Image: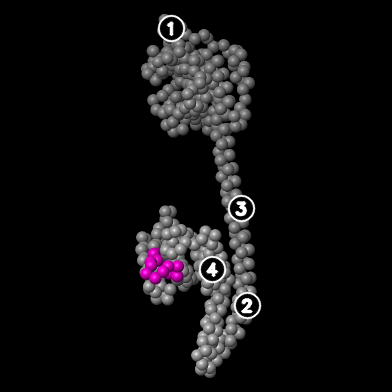
Amino acid sequence: MISHSYPSLNSPASPPFELDCPELEQLMAIGYRSGDLGAYLMEIVRGVSRIVRSDWTIVTMCSGEIGRIMASSLDLERDNAGFLLHGTLAADVIQSGRSFVIEDCRQDLCCDRLSNSYLSYLGIPLSTTNGAVIGTICSFFQVPRLFAESEIKIVELFAERAATAIENYLLYQQQQQFNEILSQQVAARTIELQLAQEQLIESERLAAIGEFTATIVHEVRNPLTTIEMGLQYAWKVLDTDADRQRLDLALSESQRLKHLLQEILSYAKPQILQLTRLHIGNFINDLLLQVRDLPETIDRQIDYVSRCPEIEVMADIDKLKQVFLNLFRNACEAIEPNETVSCQILPQPDFDRVCIQIHNGGNPIPPASLHLLTTPFYSTKPAGTGLGLAISQRIIIAHGGELAIVSSDSGTTVNVLLPIFSA
């Protein structure tokens, strides 16, 4: 839509447009180079401004209700200044998709939408190849202006060039973003495949170790059983206290060795889980009845608080019981009589995991030892096998969870994180 107004007799009009002006030749020679959109649009606005002899020419882009100045023939305080499109002349151009002209705003109903310092206006839409209007070229004049049809056509030609450049730039940016996302996905997938390969190699290694360990344990356990039977028979035959005292020590050591062989076997063999739905609050409640009967818990208090009692997990009950019996036993061994171990069930912020937290006082674990606690055969206890936490961690990892230990002057906290079951 072209709005026609005529200049006042007392107002000078701008000089007539010359089709063969040198500015037009210079503007026609401008070419867009991929990635250098800002410089190209600046050449467009400066060339158009010289051709139509405007006081100010801009290229705008629109996104929804927001317009943005992409290039200006005058210096602006801020680059790419944004503005609301509603009620502006640019909005009329974008909505109509056609060129819009005001030759003298003093004789036009649109006069209130031009700044006081401008009297005439030329607005050209920037249309993409599919007909979408993505912005405008707008020229403002401080004097009344008669626009020749050929003049408008020339500006429309460069509006088409600007629209093509912007469209190509946006497509280039989309392609760059797609390439970036694709690169990230490829990198993530590569890491996943590497981890899967490492896990497969580790599984094969553990399977081989497990098979070898099972053979060794079997070969040691059989003669150990024979030795133990001989010691028990000797204990019955010998009747002196000194002899029985020595036999009690030997039997105790044979039991410790059998326990060690069982733990080695438990650590070495693959963790095959028998998963069932488990109400975690009820599980801890029932487990604490058994924990309070352990010798290590005598004269120790266990406080239990559940902040998410309705949460369920998929777990192997026997293996999970093995983990928490070991953790409660360790916590009680670390404190003095009449001291307290606390246990809490806490939801995680992302609500896809539940945390079972066990805290005990006592001396802090040295930082140098903290990261070694789940290493096989590492123990801070004189009589420890160093396999309890290593086995516990393997069981929790097999459940898709995490076992984390932190220690400070206030004591030691073990956090067991398990995925929440959702039907």
Which is more N-terminal, label 1 or label 2? 1
Q: Could one spot residue 157 in this view of the protein?
A: no
Which is more N-terminal, label 2 or label 4? 2
Q: Nearer the viewer, mark 1 or mark 4?
A: 4
Front residue (pair 74, 333): 333
Q: Could one spot residue 11 in this view of the protein?
A: yes
Q: CA distance from mark 3 to mark 4?
A: 37 Å
Whether residue 125 is situated above or below residue 275 in the rendered picture: above
Q: Mark 1 highlights which residue?
A: 11
Tell me, yes or no, whether the two marked residues, 3 and 2, touch with CB atoms within 8 Å.
no
Front residue (pair 381, 319): 381
The quadrant holding residue 413 is bottom left
Secondary structure of residue under mark 1: loop
Q: Is residue 1 magenta?
A: no
Which is more N-terminal, label 4 or label 1? 1
Q: CA distance from mark 1 to mark 4?
A: 98 Å
Please tell me how crowded label 1 is: few (under 14), some (14-19), or many (20+) other residues with Cα within 10 Å: few
Which amino acid type is shown beneath numbered disc 1? Ser
Which amino acid type is shown beneath numbered disc 4? Ser
Q: Nearer the viewer, mark 3 or mark 4?
A: 4
Q: Mark 4 highlights which residue?
A: 379
Which amino acid type is shown beneath numbered disc 3? Thr
Secondary structure of residue under mark 3: helix
Q: Residue 173: horizontal and vertical position, in percent?
A: 56, 36
Q: Mark 2 highlights which residue?
A: 216
Q: Mark 3 highlights which residue?
A: 190
The mark found on residue 411 in the picture is none
Q: CA distance from mark 3 to mark 2?
A: 38 Å
